[in-house]
Amino acid sequence: MIPNRLTEALNDQIKNELESAYIYLSMAAYFHSQGLDGMAHWMRCQAHEETIHAMKFMDHLIDRNTPVTLLHLKQLKTEWHSASEAWKEAYAHEQFITAKINALTAISREEKDYQSEPLLAWFAKEQIEEEATSSKIAGEMEMVGDSKSALLMLDRELGARTFPPGSPFDPAAYASAT
Ligand code: FEO
């Protein structure tokens, strides 16, 4: 069993990761409404990744014979003033998640739960990538400014991200499902 204090924080992190998926799906819907289907597609791919992150934490609790508690997800924002604002928020959100992973690592050490460290080390590394990617796109959006042609080029580029095969977030995967 995982110590209580860490169990609570890990259950909270399952919620944070699912909330991340919600945030990115909400941004996907917003981007679709703005005609930015490439950005919407990128956000759907990201929502897939966040759901996997939640499952990794959930499986860790199950493997350690520790109770899983799925917490309440709050109502999230559905509108942004601009695509650029949404990307800035995506970057800020990844910074928030990094702080949560760091706090979990600190708790696991304080509670001497060394078996949680490999998973948290994986997430620490993952967050370097997640922050770098969202920060890069947020920066590119700043450079795009008011240029519609640059915005369309970036939208096309982001639309090239690929889903893992069979992802339920990929419209092509469920279009043919019964
Ligand atoms: Fe699961 Fe984007 O952090």
Image (spheres, rainbow, N blue to C red):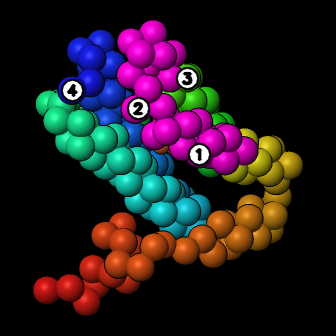
Disc number lying in front (4 or 3): 4
Element carrying mark 3: helix
Q: Earlier in the sequence, mark 2 or mark 4?
A: 4
Which of marks 2 and 1 precedes in the sequence? 2
Q: Which mark is residue 1?
A: 4
- Please state the extent of the stretch shown in magenta in the rendering: 105-132
- Separation of residues labelled 1 and 4 (CA atoms): 25 Å
Q: Which residue is mark 2?
A: 116
Earlier-in-chain disc, 2 versus 3? 3
Of the two numbered discs 2 and 3 in the rendering, the one whose residue sits closer to the viewer = 2
Q: Nearer the viewer, residue 78 or 53?
A: 53
Relative to 164, residue 64 above or below: above
The quarter of the picture where the N terminus appears is top left
Q: Nearer the viewer, residue 115 or 86?
A: 115
Q: Looking at numbered disc 4 in the image, what kind of residue is underneath it?
A: Met
Q: Is mark 1 within 8 Å of ligand 1?
A: yes
Q: Does the image show residue 96? A: no
Which residue is identified by label 1? 126
